[in-house]
Amino acid sequence: MLNRYSRVIVAIAACFVIASGAALARTAEPDEIRTADLPPQARQTLDTIRQNGPFSFSRDGIVFGNRERALPARSRGYYHEYTVRTPGTRGRGARRIVCGGNQSSIAECYYSDDHYQTFRRIR
């Protein structure tokens, strides 16, 4: 009985280790992209953020919740999202820039071209 009990404990511990690793992977620092390598529309969005608007979409500047933990953990309200225009699309499209800190600061910004599935830190 002790042997079977030990195997159950080891299996449970392994599940915790795997789950912890997955959580760490989600909160790891995203890859990077240079500003010069961004699409021109994303560079324009950065300029608009720096000028604190005016923004093209009513949802630009709203709080980004980071529920998927794709970005480094920060307090609620730290991140704000902005639309990057996508040529050929009628609505907001899938491209976004998410910046942390002061709303007119671009010191900590991330680019997503797949609607928050992946992010790259803008350098």
Image (tube, rainbow, N blue to C red):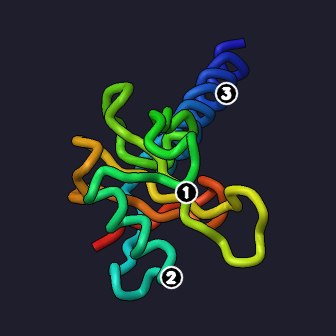
Q: Is residue 49 above or below residue 81?
A: below
Say which element carries label 2: loop
Q: Which residue type does callout 2 highlight? A: Pro
Work out which quarter of the rendered image holds the C terminus and state it. Answer: bottom left
Whether residues under marks 2 and 3 lie with C-beta atoms below 8 angstroms apart, the answer is no
> For the residue marked with disc 3, what is the amino acid?
Arg
**Relative to the observer, which residue lies in front, 47 or 19?**
47
Name the residue tied to disc 2: 39
**Would you name the residue on which mark 3 appears?**
7
Residue pointed to by mark 1? 83
Task: Say above or below: 37 vs 57.
Answer: below
Judged left or right of residue 31, residue 95 is right
Q: Residue at x 22, y 42 (%)?
A: 102
Viewer-closest of 117 and 115: 115
**Among the 4 quarters of the image, the one containing residue 93:** bottom right
Q: Nearer the viewer, residue 95 or 119?
A: 95
Q: CA distance from mark 2 to mark 3?
A: 53 Å
Q: Quadrant of the N terminus?
A: top right
Amino acid carrying mark 1 in the image: Thr
Q: In the displayed image of the protein, which residue is found farthest to the front?
A: 54
Residue 17 screen position, x and y as percent: 52, 38
Cα separation, mark 3 vs mark 1, equals 51 Å
Q: Position of residue 23 (x, y in %)?
A: 51, 40
Does residue 29 appear left or right of residue 4 in this picture?
Answer: left
Rendering coords of residue 106 (x, y %): 26, 58
